[in-house]
Every structure is written in C-alpha cells, then in structure tokens.
C-alpha cells in the first residue's frame, strides 16, 4: 500500500501533540483499538508461528505485572481514546491474573469493549469467570477439525480441549464466538469448507486469515500462501456467497453472506487486500513496548519509563509520539520489506 491509497490527513492541531488528543498518526488515522499481549508463552506450537521446541521466553522481570497492564490500559482508555481492548498472547489463558486484568479493564470509564483471542485450551474451565469479570466476547484460533492435522499443525493433541472451550464460551454468553483459521498449502488447505460447515452448525462466526510473514523461523513466502481468492473458490463450490453490504469501517475482515444470510464468513486478507488505510490499532507487548503496526521494526518502551516513575501524562505523551511515526502501510509488497524481528507470539494479534 502506498500513501496514495490512504485518505487525506484529518489531523487537528491538537492531535498527537504531547499533552493533548488521542492516538493520531501523520496520515490521519486514529487508533482506538488496543491489542494487549499478556504473555509470549503458548501451549501449542503452530507451524506458522513458532518452532516445535518453542522459543526463548521473556524473563518474568521484563514482563509487565498485572497492575502495570491495568495502568497502561487505563491510560489508553481514559486519556487516549481507546474504545476496544483485546487481550492476546502468546496464549493469554496462561496468564494467572487474566480474570483480574479483564475485570480492571471492564471497570474503566468510559467502558471499552473487551475481548480475548485464545487457542481455547483451558477455556472450558475459566469461561464463566471471564464472563463474570465482564469479558464481552472470544476469538478462538482453530485451523482444522481433523485430529491428525491438528497434531501436525500444533504439535499437540488438544483438539478436544479447543472444541470444549468453544462450547463453554458460547454457553457463558461470550458471544459472538468467533473462530480464526489460517490455511497452509499442503497441510490444511482443504479444510476451508469443513470449518465453515462446522461454524454454521454451531452458530460461530468464521474468519479466515491469510498467513502473514510473522513466523519465528522466517520461512514465509507469498507463493506458498493460501490467498483470499483460493478460500473463496473453495467455499463457493458448496455455498452461495454474496458480499455483505454492511459498512466495514476499520474492521479487518471482508464479509460475505452465506446462502443469503444471516450467517456470514469473513476473510482477513492482510497480504493480498491490505487495509492499512483504515487501520485503527495500536499494540502493547507483554514487556511493555508500544508497536504502532503489526509489522513495525521499531518499538517505544513504556515499561522502563513507568518503572522509573513517569506520570500517566508522561506515558500518554510517549504513546502519542510513538503513534505519530506510524508508516502508511505494512510494505509487504515492497522489495525492501523486512520481517519484524519478533514473531507473532511475542507481538500479540
């Protein structure tokens, strides 16, 4: 994406300036959606994310404490205009203080929408507590319904736990329950239709995500990626898909009505149909770094400043300045594109 693809800047004099305004970049986009990684650890080893042996995890001393997470989320909501907070990982269910962190976020004023992206292992046990803490909804990663392919993809035999977590989330009222799927050539690229039929049967909302260059071993190639067009071709062989006319806004997924609706299926085509021009996201890593783009190669350190006594106003100013530097697009198609040094598990979705 080039700057020509972006809307004309709408930056007001006070926006992005230290001491005032929200999270506005130099291209007129305002970040109102915060993704918070609570841990870089995970109990699966999905091949598009990390190697089977895992990664070198963050030392505990470098991770934000529960109180520090709550403080920074509060600054985002109360001072910087954040309206949606999504907790991610790694796997956020591995964070012991997750329920309390959710409770602190939902107690903020104005209250943000609070959601969770998870692999759902252990969700069956904790879904009622998350609902009681005020969590609004759940996104669950599920790439196949075939047990052997699940083991091949994730290096763990945990499909039953994921399915139980999905059912528990729906029963707890964490709806709409969304399912996120990544398809890989030669592995699970035939699973698009079974996943859609499963979600239609259970009332889940399915979203396919094009594989992005965020794997730990930097093996991604565009030529091996299952594209949005590939997915649509598979689904259209069995279902009538019509574009959803509802305003998309800054939502990353393009949606189609399935057999006339009301059920829909979405595709997040981050690579082939990039939506950088309407991006409204900012990211906080588990070790307290602000990333203004999923593919950013630079971060802004809030943890150190916070631990050295920075005030809420000073931390908010650092966040605003970090946002100003956001590039017009991710640049995957640019010959000079370099994959971020951190993998997805250390960034947060």
Image: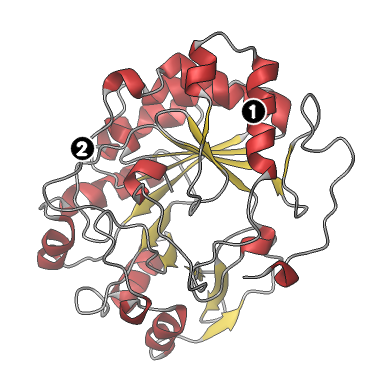
Badge 1: residue crowd in 10 Å (few <14, some 14–19, many ≥20):
some
Residue located 74% across and 71% down the image: 4
- Residue highlighted by disc 2: 56
Q: Nearer the viewer, residue 252 or 179?
A: 252
Residue 344 appearing in the image: yes
Residue lying at the far bottom in this picture: please name it: 237
- CA–CA distance in space, label 1 to label 2: 28 Å
Q: From the viewer's perspective, is 224 left or right of 324?
A: left
Residue lying at the far right in this picture: please name it: 13
Residue 111 appearing in the image: no
| Above-or-below relation of 317 to 338 | above
Residue located 40% across and 68% down the image: 200
Q: From the viewer's perspective, is 11 left or right of 40?
A: right
- Residue highlighted by disc 1: 318
| Above-or-below relation of 321 to 252 | above
| Above-or-below relation of 236 to 293 | below
Badge 2: residue crowd in 10 Å (few <14, some 14–19, many ≥20):
few
Residue located 69% across and 34% down the image: 320
Q: From the viewer's perspective, is 228 left or right of 218?
A: right
Residue located 43% across and 61% down the image: 338
Q: Nearer the viewer, residue 138 or 155?
A: 155
Residue lying at the far front in this picture: please name it: 336
Residue 40 pos. (x, y %): 31, 37
Residue 301 pos. (x, y %): 51, 29
Label located before the other in sequence (1 or 2): 2
């Amino acid at each position: 994406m080039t700057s020509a693809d972006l809307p004309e800047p709408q930056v007001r004099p006070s926006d992005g300036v230290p001491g005032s305004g929200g999270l506005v970049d130099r291209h007129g986009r305002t970040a109102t959606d915060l993704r918070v990684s609570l841990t870089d650890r995970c109990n699966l080893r999905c091949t598009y994310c990390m190697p089977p042996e895992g990664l070198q995890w963050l030392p505990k001393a470098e991770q934000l404490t529960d109180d520090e997470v709550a403080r920074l989320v509060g600054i985002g909501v109360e001072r910087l205009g954040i309206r949606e907070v999504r907790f991610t990982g790694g796997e956020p269910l591995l964070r012991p203080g997750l329920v309390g962190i959710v409770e602190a976020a939902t107690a903020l004023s104005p209250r943000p929408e609070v959601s969770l992206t998870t692999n759902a292992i252990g969700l069956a046990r904790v879904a009622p507590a998350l609902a009681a803490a005020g969590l609004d909804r759940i996104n669950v990663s599920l790439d196949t319904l075939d047990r052997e392919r699940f083991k091949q993809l994730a290096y763990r035999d945990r499909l039953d736990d994921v399915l139980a977590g999905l059912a528990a989330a729906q029963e707890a009222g964490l709806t709409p329950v969304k399912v996120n799927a990544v398809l890989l050539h030669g592995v699970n690229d035939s699973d698009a239709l079974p996943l859609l039929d499963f979600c239609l049967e259970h009332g889940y909302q399915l979203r396919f995500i094009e594989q992005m260059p965020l794997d730990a071993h930097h093996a991604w190639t565009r030529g091996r990626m299952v594209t949005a067009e590939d997915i649509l071709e598979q689904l259209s062989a069995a279902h009538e898909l019509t574009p959803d006319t509802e305003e998309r806004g800054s939502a990353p997924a393009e949606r189609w009505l399935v057999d006339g609706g009301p059920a829909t299926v979405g595709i997040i085509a981050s690579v082939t149909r990039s939506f950088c021009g309407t991006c409204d996201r900012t990211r906080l890593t588990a070790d307290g770094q602000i990333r203004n783009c999923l593919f950013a190669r630079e971060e802004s350190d809030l943890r150190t400043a916070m631990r050295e006594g920075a005030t809420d106003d000073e931390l908010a100013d650092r966040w605003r300045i970090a946002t100003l530097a956001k590039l017009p697009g991710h640049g995957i198609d640019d010959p000079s594109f370099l994959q971020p040094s951190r993998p997805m598990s250390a960034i947060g979705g």
